[in-house]
Image (cartoon, rainbow, N blue to C red):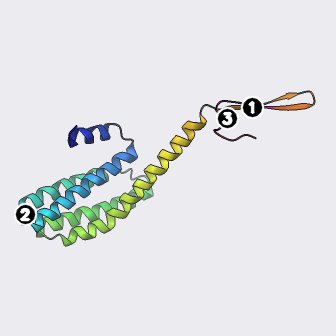
């Protein structure tokens, strides 16, 4: 399979958190490519790659739910980074992109950790699904019953 097919499959099978991570990765790829084109003096390709990066950050911005306080903070950071990308593009100056990466890299790492945490939580709860536990009361006795894989969950 080629890279585009792999990416399409990855996006198609991604949950919302994974889509954010994929968007960040696409943006970083575009920024890295822009920096490389700038070093080689290919300013037209530099500008095109920055247009791609700006498209990615605009997508992240547009996906925010501004009714939540954290979204407002992220929106401000995305707005700042987008403006710095535009300044880099206008002035053909990659130093603006260094500032952008200093802000976006920790955010990306945080999203990666959050996605991992959510996946491990989902896997843990999926393991417990098959267990049924209960107690029965008889005259003078209390009986415990567990049905399912004995190695999952907790016993009283």
Mark nearer the viewer, 1 or 3: 3
* Mark 1 neighbour class, 10 Å CA radius: few under 14, some 14 to 19, many 20 or more: few
Q: Residue at x 74, y 31 (%)?
A: 134
Depth check: give the residue in front, 135 or 55: 135
Q: Which residues are magenta?
A: 144-152
Q: Position of residue 75 (x, y in %)?
A: 34, 59
Disc 3 secondary structure class: loop
Q: How many numbered discs, if any?
A: 3
Q: Nearer the viewer, residue 40 or 98?
A: 40
Q: In the shown orientation, is residue 117 left or right of residue 54?
A: right
Let me know if residue 147 is in the magenta part: yes
**Location of residue 97 in the rendering, given as x and y in whole percent from the top left corner:** 22, 67
Q: Is residue 108 visible?
A: yes
Q: CA distance from mark 3 to mark 2?
A: 64 Å
Residue at position x 36%, y 41% from top? 14
Is there a contact, CB below 8 Å, between mark 1 and mark 3?
A: no
Whole-percent x and y of residue 111?
40, 55
Residue of label 3: 150
Identify the mark nearer the N-term, 1 or 2.
2
Quadrant in the rendering for residue 9: top left
In the picture of the structure, the residue carrying the numbered disc 1 is 134
Q: Which residue is mark 2?
A: 43
Q: CA distance from mark 1 to mark 3?
A: 14 Å
Question: Which class describes the residues within 10 Å of circle 3: few (<14), some (14-19), or many (20+)?
Answer: few
Magenta region includes residue 148:
yes
Q: Is residue 73 left or right of residue 29?
A: right
Q: Quadrant of residue 105?
A: bottom left
Sort mark 2 into few (<14), some (14-19) or many (20+) by Cα contacts within 10 Å.
Answer: some
Q: Quadrant of residue 42?
A: bottom left
Mark nearer the N terminus (3 vs 2): 2
Callout 1: SS: strand
Residue nearest the observer in this picture, 31 or 70: 31
């Amino acid at each position: 399979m080629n890279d585009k097919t792999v990416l399409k499959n990855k996006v198609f099978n991604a949950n919302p958190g994974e889509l954010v991570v994929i968007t960040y990765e696409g943006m970083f790829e575009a920024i890295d490519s822009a920096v490389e084109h700038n070093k080689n003096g290919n300013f037209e390709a530099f500008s095109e790659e920055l247009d791609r990066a700006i498209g990615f950050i605009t997508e992240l911005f547009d996906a925010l739910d501004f009714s939540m306080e954290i979204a407002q903070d992220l929106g401000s950071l995305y707005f700042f980074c987008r403006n710095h990308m535009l300044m880099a593009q206008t002035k053909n100056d990659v130093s603006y992109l260094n500032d952008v990466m200093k802000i976006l890299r920790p955010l990306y790492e945080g999203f990666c950790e959050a996605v991992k945490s959510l996946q491990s939580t989902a896997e843990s709860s999926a393991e417990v699904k098959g267990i049924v536990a209960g107690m029965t009361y008889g005259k003078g006795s209390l009986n415990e019953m567990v049905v399912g894989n004995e190695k999952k969950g907790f016993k009283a």
